[in-house]
Amino acid sequence: QVQLVESGGGLVQAGGSLRLSCAASGRTFSTFSNYAMGWFRQAPGKEREFVAALRWSGRTTYYADSVKDRFTISGGNAKNSQYLYLQMNNLKLEDTAVYYCAAGVVADVYTDSLYDYWGQGTQVTVSS
């Protein structure tokens, strides 16, 4: 099992910045070639959507078009764990959502149903 714990959400004005963190502990799959960690979000009344992902092998990053050039995903290994960050700049009202960290051995980083492990979510609220 993998445990994921997010932190860093909060209330911020439009144009501001936040940094989300996700700590992953427990069984590690990070040596698998298709292992990835990602961020998804779900706004009220909407389906969960892909935000960004990082493949551990090769450190390839992926972004949704809506956040490209504003958000930056990064991560790495710590002793017996992994960590994942999402630096969010120039936040917009439409970025308001619950943000979830996910991890798994996935063929397609964009598809949430392929991820096996999820955090509890952290609320990000952007005000005008």
Image: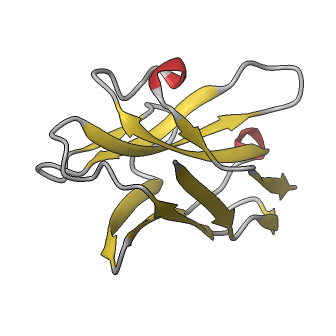
- Residue 97 visible in the snapshot: yes
Identify whether 111 is placed above or below 121: above
Q: Where in the figure is residue 11, as x and y percent of width and height?
A: 85, 65
- For this orientation, the residue located farthest to the bottom is 79
Q: Could you tell whether 86 is left or right of 44 in the image?
A: left
Quadrant position of the C terminus in the picture: bottom right
Residue 20 is situated, as x and y percent measured from the top left of the image, at 60, 65
Identity of the residue drawn at 36% across and 73% down:
80
Q: Where is residue 67 in the image (x, y as percent from the top left)?
A: 50, 42
Its colouring scheme is secondary structure
**Residue sitting at the far left:** 58
Residue nearest the observer in this picture, 17 or 40: 40
Q: From the viewer's perspective, is residue 90 above or below residue 96?
A: below
Where residue 116 appears, as percent x and y from the top left, is: 51, 32
Based on the displayed image, in which of its 4 quarters is residue 126 positioned? bottom right
Q: Which of 75 and 69 is in front in this view?
A: 75
Identify which residue is drawn at 77% across, 44% down. Answer: 98
30 sits to left or right of 59: right
Q: Which residue is found at the position 74% from the left and 38% from the top? A: 94
Residue drawn at x 68%, y 25% as measured from the top left: 48
Total numbered circles: 0
Q: In this view, does 113 lie to the left or right of 68?
A: right
Taking the image as drawn, is residue 96 in sight?
A: no
Judge from the rendering whether residue 75 lies leftward or rightward of residue 43; answer left or right.
left
